[in-house]
Image (cartoon, grey):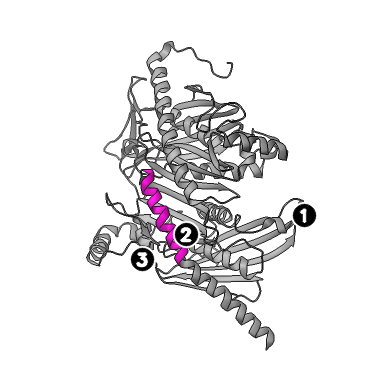
Amino acid sequence: MPLDHRRLRGPEESQPPALWASAAAEDEEDEEGAGAAPRDPCALRPLFARAGLLSQAQGSAYVELGSGTKVLCAAWGPREAAEPGPGRLICEFRRAPFAGRGARGRPGAAAEREAEREAAAALREALEPAVRLGRYPRARLAVSALLLQDGGSALAAAVSAAALALADAGVEMYDLAVGCALCRPPAPAASWMLQPAEPEERRAAARLTLALLPALNQVSAVLGGGRGGPPEDWAQALRLGLDGCHRQYPVLRQSLLRAAQRRDAAAAA
Amino acid sequence: MASVMLSEAEKLYIVHGVQEDLRVDGRGCEDYRCAEVETDVVSNTSGSARVKLGETDILVGIKAEMGTPKLEKPDEGYLEFFVDCSSNSPELEGRGGEELGTDIANTLYRVFSCENSVDLKSLCINPKEHCWVLYVDVLLLECGGNIFDAISIAVKAALFNTRIPKVRVLEDEEGTKEIELSDDPYDCIRLNVDEVPCIVTLSKIGYRHVVDATLQEEACSLASLLISVTSKGAITSMKKVGKGSLDPESIFEMMETGQRVGKSLHIALQKILDEEENLGTSRPKVGFLG
């Protein structure tokens, strides 16, 4: 219904009531968090990956992490581009309006679009080393990631999903890019934790996301910031992240194999 | 980014030279080009700095304005970054320059996202109502390779040079707010820049990495790592840029080099800034004519 401006005009900016109710509620949350057994920092959350689920896109993948992050990704194989030159990879990252835990930001808001563009650039950084763009001159490969629910480590899950989707679309790649996120809580001598959940990520003093090509052991993306400390701490975090990526790799390969088998069975039937 | 066309033979020449720790202009792999830093070049700003690193020319102006604090941090001020690249070269006009500008601005936001880089609590006037917002505007006058390093040096120098007037906001009985400025124009807040980080870009060429790459060297390198280092050697952010991938061992080596180079960069920069400060008003201003 169109807005009736003659009636009550609400404030131009609205804020969620949670901001003012935070004092009492956060105390409760902190107590709960401290009371529960401290999490094993090297534990990987359960990962569910499935490729080949969208019929309209040439390749697709869905990745779900144990903390609640759900990413759906679609990829389209080479299409002819107008500009001459080597092949280009175009990435897009969208957040569903209901994805975040806090208030629903207006979907077209500038800050929202900025964050999406930054994430899309990071996604492209992570995927470009993995794709054999030299085999697709004058072509455009498109990848579109949609974040359905943000439960922490969203960008890492999106990298894994996008690599799976590209592989499912039949694009020639050197290797699958596996993403992993880490964070470090604000306590003074805290250690880095793998795959943080959303509240841990929000309170973190430092965050790191990395993407690895496991078979070649090459890092394709590193993005981190915050109060990390001396290089030894960051090196330790990197090693933990690389180990996490290696452990996730078999699950992703398995999902690709299953998708190929399903496609064969459907074609034979 | 502005790029140079290089033939394969030229690329090979640069790569072989770097293997021997000898770059085209005679530097070692960890040497910076000759840099000129000058502060207080623009008089209408609260603080400004100009940095010329080889061919790269950056101008930063900081304006301090009063605004309302953000909802999540009611007793702190904040910084806003804006980067303008359009004056640079024809290929950077319009969309291309805008993308590069937002990319640099996002990197600056990430570098300064660490809470103790700038003392934001000193920028607060009245909690929840008034605070200082520092608008940092970066102009890329000429791109000669290694713009991130030059921009971070310029931002640090401009923050050191920033003078924010001391202000009190008084509220009288009817609720009208009155802003009281001190009479002395030299009575101002200065920012402590000890924890402000500087970005060090390490570009991987062949099997070694170089600091402060020129445009030609950037064309030979497939992947670079941007690290922001504080003067105490703590790393506050990391980002890999480029089309290629990096070996984990190279990343560890690059971080060590970045920390070493960053620390010496901070020492040299602080020395120059202190010298400029001590000269005071008797300093000969060079500006854009030198």
Say which mark, if any, is on residue A105. 2
Q: Main secondary structure of the magenta part?
A: helix
Tell whether label 3 touches label 2 (CB within 8 Å): no
Q: Is residue B45 among the parts visible in the rendering?
A: no
Say which mark, if any, is on residue A43. 3
Mark 2 belongs to which amino acid? Gly
Categorize mark 2 by other alpha carbons within 10 Å: few (<14), some (14-19), many (20+).
Answer: some
Q: Is residue B283 above or below residue A74?
A: above
Q: Is residue B5 above or below residue A206?
A: above
- First in sequence: mark 2 vs mark 3: 3
Chain letter for the residue marked with disc 1 in the picture: A
Question: Which residue is nearer to you in this view: A159 or A119?
Answer: A159
Chain letter for the residue marked with disc 3 in the picture: A
Q: Point out the frontmost of discs 3 and 1.
A: 3
Q: Position of residue A243 (x, y in %)?
A: 43, 60
> Could you tell me which residue is drawn at 66 percent across and 69 percent down?
A170
In the figure, is residue B237 to the left or right of B94? left
Where residue B58 sits, quadrant-wise, is top right
Magenta-colored stretch includes residue A240: yes
Categorize mark 1 by other alpha carbons within 10 Å: few (<14), some (14-19), many (20+).
Answer: few
Mark 3 belongs to which amino acid? Ala
Say which mark, if any, is on residue A95. none
Magenta-colored stretch includes residue A16: no
Please state the extent of the stretch shown in magenta in the rendering.
A230-247
Mark 1 belongs to which amino acid? Ala
- First in sequence: mark 1 vs mark 2: 1
Say which mark, if any, is on residue A82. 1
Query: Helix, strand or loop at disc 3?
Result: loop
Cα separation between marks 2 and 3: 32 Å
In the figure, is residue B127 to the left or right of A78? left
